[in-house]
Amino acid sequence: MSDKNHLTKPYNNILVSEVENKGALMTGLIQLNRPDVLNALNIDLMIEVVEALESFDKDPEIGCMVLTGNKKAFAAGADIKEMAEAGAIEMLLRDQFARWDRIRKIKKPVIAAVSGFALGGGCELAMSCDMIVASESARFGQPEINLGVTPGAGGTQRLTKAIGKARAMEMILTGKMMGAAEMFEAGLVTKVVDTDLYLDEALELSREICTKPTVAVQIAKESILKSFDLTIESGLEFERKNFYLLFATEDKSEGMKAFVEKRKAQWKGK
Ligand code: DAK
């Protein structure tokens, strides 16, 4: 029996649905829904996003998730009004980063479908996902410098790893926004499409992943993400152990047998 908390919870700041993928696992779709403030990420919204991601992650009928906003904004950052009066100790005691850390523990792939502003925490949230599908009108930036702070939810680390020191320095130290085409070239974005198509394209990418053997997909994600933490030597060892592990799955036997028998594999997800 599937755990469908994501469908029964009364969310106030996000819209949650399941998207059918004929003959394959479904896509879990989360849409940030504070359009009046360009989807500024307040605490309540982040609680809901993390809960929905975790609920989809536990649901065996879901193969992949898509996180999106609207055409005008993926998210224009953390909610500045919520932080404006806070001091260092209050921020420390709020311990909001613990919630962001839980996104790193999501095992299934998460695709960010980004249009419009992806700024500050919005850019960091998109970078916490595994891939970014962007509309031509998407604008990425880390403008925290203009508020007297720096990125705090991964911007200095993930942006630098994705696009390199030279451009990360420019973006973070000036706070200026960069367009989707430039961010595609720099390596932050998986693909850029027409603004009317960005969500469809992200859902199509998700659908394709949903047709693949689940355990191998999750292991691949885990191994790729490990490459950010480990030396090449340790990373190769980690990858190898994961590779051996997949030889214990029924899907490995089925996949190789199907190839030899020249037929389509029937995945079991185990
Ligand atoms: N927070 C709160 N409200 C925001 C907002 C934000 N980040 N961004 C926009 N809004 C609100 C505006 O105040 C306005 O509300 P009203 O005045 O209508 O009530 C409404 O959204 C529409 O915005 P604008 O009128 O400004 O729209 P424009 O098209 O003229 O300009 C803009 C769009 C995106 C250029 C502009 O809104 C803007 O510069 N926004 C702020 C962008 C920004 O500085 N973002 C970085 C915020 S700092 C953390 C995790 C993460 C972070 C911090 C802590 N923890 C886990 C502890 C991240 C920090 C940040 O993201």
Image (tube, helix red, strand yellow):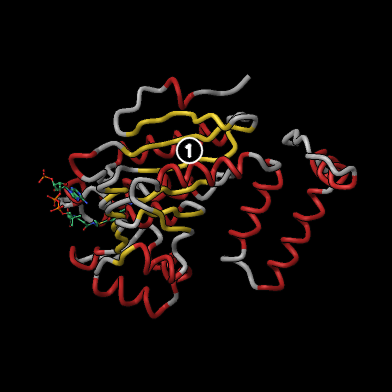
Q: Which residue is at 45% across, 34% downward? A: 52
- Image spot of residue 115 (x, y percent): 33, 51
The amino acid on which the numbered mark 1 sits, given as a three-letter code, is Leu
The mark total stands at: 1
Please rate how many residues cluster around mark 1, counting C-alpha atoms within 10 Å: few if below 14, some from 14 to 19, many from 20. Answer: many
Q: Quadrant of the N terminus?
A: top right
Q: Which residue is at 64% across, 33% downward? A: 24
**Left-right relation of 230 to 164:** right
- Image spot of residue 110 (x, y percent): 51, 46
Per the image, the residue denoted by label 1 is 53
Q: Quadrant of residue 11?
A: top left
Q: Quadrant of residue 33?
A: top left
- Image spot of residue 119 (x, y percent): 29, 57
Q: Is label 1 in a helix, a strand or a loop?
A: helix
Q: Identify which residue, 252 or 243, lies in the foreground.
A: 252
Relative to 103, residue 54 above or below: above
